[in-house]
Image (tube, coloured by chain):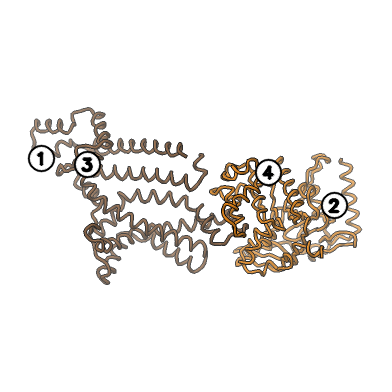
Chain colours: A orange, B brown
Amino acid sequence: MSSNDDLLLDVRGLTIRFPTSDGIVQAVTDVSYTLSRGETLGVVGESGSGKSVSNLATMGLLNRKRTLISGEILFRGRDLLTLPQDELRKVRGKEIAMVFQDPFASLHPMYRVGDQIAEAALAHANISKEAALARAVELLDHVGIPNARNRARDYPHQFSGGMRQRAMIAMALVHNPSVLICDEPTTALDVTVQAQILELIEEVKREYNIGVILVTHDLGVVAETANSVMVMYAGRIMEYGPAEQVFGRPQHPYAWGLLDSMPSIEQRLERLVPIEGAPPSLIAPPSGCPFHPRCPYRFEPCPTEVPPLVAPVPDAHPDACHLPWERKVELGTQRSLLARDAA
Amino acid sequence: MIFYIARRLVWTIVVVFCVIGITYIVFYKLPAGNPALRFAGHSPTQQEITEIEHRLGLDKPWYVQFGKFAYHFFAGDQYGWPGLGYTFASGASVKSLVFSRAPRTLLLIAGAAILWLLSGVAIGVISAVRRRSLTDRFAMGFALFGISTPVFWLGLMMLYIFWSRLGWTAGTGYVSPASSVGGFFSHMILPWITLALLYAAFYARMTRNNLLETLGEDYIRTARAKGLSERRVIFKHGLRASLTPIVTMFGMDIALLVGGAVITESVFNLQGLGYLAINSATNQDLPIVAGVVLLAAVAVALANLVVDILYAFIDPRVRYA
């Protein structure tokens, strides 16, 4: 019973298309993943890799009329994609909550912070306005806003960036959701504040025993907090597995590229290697493996065949790459040797 | 907040003072010819002219004249407050003339403003919410029609159709609501609609564009993510933020119309302030024109003040700026 109850999200074959006047944007293609209680799923990839869009689909925040979505997003067994709008609204903000990237733009500039949180409380509970405000103050205090009772009466522009993001987290926690989606929650913040916000998210996850999806392009953030990691590129999953495996023994050339382009304290800065080329157009994505035009190891099947997301050997995690397992091991070993030399 | 309002108030007084100065220069200093001649009648003697100059204070230096002019405006003259002097033609009080015409213009503006604000914002919201639908296209087509239609043509068409052909309304002229409420509405409905149409079209477009822009903001996504109903997202979160530029426009439009509803007034023969000003200008009766201009300018300054204060209530960020 426990494992089934712990499974919160089960996304299967999620595919999202935006028809535009320039053509159809293939934002997300055949993406499957799961999220359980107490798990932090890190989703990494460059801008435009489909990280945010798949989460907006989970929240039901994509315009259904102007988006083609297929696949399933099962939340505790219910498919969110086929749920009627008003049913979906009862899930949104109550059972699945989201924290957005830019706290400077995500709060309404003309309403008091406390009122905005209270509004979230009133959206799904039949309580008095006073009770909702009290809940807002309690949560602001809980996420570490000093003097919460007074600060709740402030407007967003009187808050610093970190405080606003704390307020956003407080807002997300109003109904004790079981899934918290954080879409690049630290990108707009100072480095010192970033760590505090990540710590807060971790605390919240442990305390409420919820599942967290952490979308970011900062691998350092994922390495610190995630249990499992999903690497996305051009709307597809390139590699998906437990964090220690993806970071310790990455299998996909794109993941290698990402890791090599990340500055770290151990490695000297001249060893920073960018991935050549630019992310592909999602209107006309490359044939075969979407990463092949930028991949230094591409060979004969790459431009024509889309590699399936499978585990190459039983004790490895799934990746979407045509390279034979022996070759991956060989290249991976070279990589780690290079890294060790540089250190 | 109090400091903010006080600062705005001081500014308004400064602006009104500048307006008085400019009005004085434009209407009393710049016009060629001696005003005394206008009062004097046919072939006056030099002695008569000197006498009139003395009576009008024209023999005093300009700053004394201006001082009196400004003093009368703020403190009133023999005709009461605000002192606007008397006319060249009849020597009657400008104030009583202006005040007898003002209600017509003000009632015209008020009725039209209510119409255009309600219809314009409503159409804009519907258009934005149903973007690219048939309703939206139709509404924006209507807006284009409203913006492109000349007011005099529209007014005449209205009169032709609803008065002359259908006989649903009264025709031109003005009936005071004090004498007949029904007659007042029957006479005013066409001018109201005529004047409101252009503005309704502008407001519909502006509301639509503002709301569409606002609905793309991150905080609207946050509101949806909270699980709020779409109605609440649009009206509480969207419209509130789209309202600021509309309030600005509204204040300015109303103020500008105090002297600017001339065409509508003429077509419907309402004989309001604009009509008075135009008539007086052709007769070169400058004190009347100056009086109307002064009042219109003060109306603009006051509208600005009201808008600024409203701004602070709508957008908390303004209070601290």
* Residue pointed to by mark 2: A244
- Specify the amino acid type for callout 4: Gly
Q: Is residue B205 left or right of residue B183?
A: right
Q: Which mark is residue B41?
A: 1
For the residues labelled 3 and 4, the Cα–Cα distance comes to: 67 Å
Measure how far apart labels 3 and 1 are at the Cα level: 18 Å
Residue B184 horizontal side relative to residue B225, left or right: left
Q: Which amino acid, mark 1?
A: Gly
Q: Nearer the viewer, mark 3 or mark 1?
A: 3
Q: CA distance from mark 4 to mark 1?
A: 85 Å
Name the residue tied to disc 3. B287
In this image, A155 relative to B150: left or right?
A: right
In the image shown, does B187 or B46 lie closer to the viewer?
B187
* Residue underneath mark 4: A144
Front in this rendered view, residue B191 or A273: B191
Question: Disc 4 vs disc 1: which is toward the camera?
Answer: 4
x, y percentage for residue B309? Answer: 43, 44
Are callouts 1 and 2 both on one chain? no
Q: Residues within 10 Å of mark 4 (few under 14, many from 20)?
A: some
Q: Inspect this view and state whether residue B78 appears.
A: yes
Tell me whether the residue at label 1 lies in contact with that at label 2, contact meaning CB atoms closer than 8 angstroms.
Answer: no
Tell me whether circle 3 and circle 4 mark residues in contact (CB < 8 Å). no
Q: Position of residue A269 (x, y in %)?
A: 79, 40
Q: SS at mark 1?
A: loop
Relative to residue A301, is residue A260 depicted above or below?
above
Say which chain tag 2 marks: A
Disc 2/disc 3 C-alpha distance (Å):
88 Å
- The answer for which chain carries disc 4 is A
